[in-house]
Amino acid sequence: MPKERYPLHQRIPEPEIMDEEEQVRAYAEADFSAPHEMFVDLFEERLGKDIEGLFLDLGCGPCDISVRFLKRFPKAQLHALDASAPMLSQAERLISKEGLKERIRLFHARLPLSGNELPCKTYDGLIVNSLLHHLPNQAIFWEAVEKFAKPSGVVFVMDLLRPEDKETARELVEQYSGSEPEILKRDFYNSLLAAYRDYEVREFLKKTNLSCLTVEVVSDRHFLVWGKR
Ligand SMILES: C[S@@+](CC[C@H](N)C(=O)[O-])C[C@H]1O[C@@H](n2cnc3c(N)ncnc32)[C@H](O)[C@@H]1O
């Protein structure tokens, strides 16, 4: 008998900030090398090797992506922001271990941002991975992107792609995090259900000043939004 499938016509939001101790530890210790290397590989493929300037990483979490970005692009500097203090503690540890303190500054702040939380009004580029689906709506996210990316600045956003149904979400969790702690699997499942479809993002961006950005599906569970403002 075929398995029952529950179509996901709409996203199911999940808790916004990740600040439970066990949750943060599981996230910081998980092996994200494949998707996070894909993030920097795709950045280099689309925007080139010769990247320099001051970038902003929104929802940086434990800074695994930020560190990979700084290592790949040695002329880049970063400001990285998250609303979770325990995530930022993990980030501090990683940055010290990697000897990158001179090239990155951390900020504890929550979107929506007024602009006073950061020392710079705009940045040469924004990099963001897996923040969009945590927020209550797309407007909060894209308003921050528009506010902080300078004219002609780079925008590079990767996020989870909501699967067709809950059964596919369960299969993806088993396939990609089968041996991880239950709490990480729970969060991954909830994140897949909270994620957007690529066409929902495309539709939203058409109504903004960011309609020049390209939205493309890049894996069975990720889409990318990228370009220059
Ligand atoms: C799934 S994690 C992604 C972390 C990191 N970008 C990565 O790819 O590993 C999402 C992060 O966004 C943060 N976050 C959620 N809502 C936020 C908000 N409104 N403002 C700032 N950070 C937020 C969470 O605390 C969490 O650290």
Image (tube, rainbow, N blue to C red):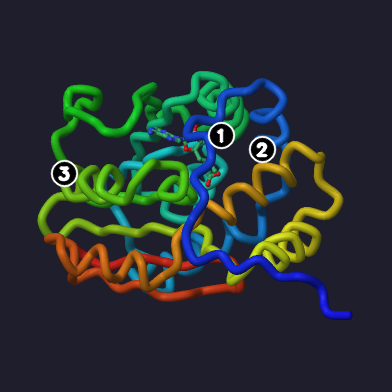
Q: How many marks?
A: 3
At which x and y percent is residue 34? 66, 61
Give the camera-side residue of 188 and 34: 188
Alpha carbon separation for disc pair 2 and 3: 29 Å
Q: Which residue is mark 1?
A: 62
Please state if 192 lies on the left or on the right of 123 as rendered.
right
Q: Earlier in the sequence, mark 1 or mark 2?
A: 2
Of the 4 image quadrants, the one containing the N terminus is bottom right
Q: Please tell me which of labels 1 and 3 falls first in the chain.
A: 1
> Residue 28 lies in what quarter of the image?
top right
Query: Is the C-beta separation of discs 1 and 3 under 8 Å?
Result: no
Q: Is residue 93 left or right of residue 4?
A: left
Indicate the position of residue 14 as horizontal and vertical percent values. Answer: 53, 41
| Residue 27: numbered disc | 2
**Counting other residues with Cα less than 10 Å from the Cα at mark 1, is it few (<14), some (14-19), or many (20 or more)?**
many
Badge 3 crowding class, 10 Å Cα cut-off, few under 14, some 14 to 19, many 20 or more, is some
| Distance of label 1 from label 2 (alpha carbons) | 8 Å
- Say which quarter of the image contains residue 30: top right
Q: Secondary structure at mark 3?
A: helix
Q: Residue at x 42, y 66 (%)?
A: 224
Residue where numbered disc 3 is placed: 147
Decide which of 99, 117 is in the foreground and name it.
Answer: 117
Q: Amino acid at mark 3?
A: Lys
The amino acid type found where label 2 is placed reads Tyr
Q: Is residue 173 left or right of residue 225?
A: right
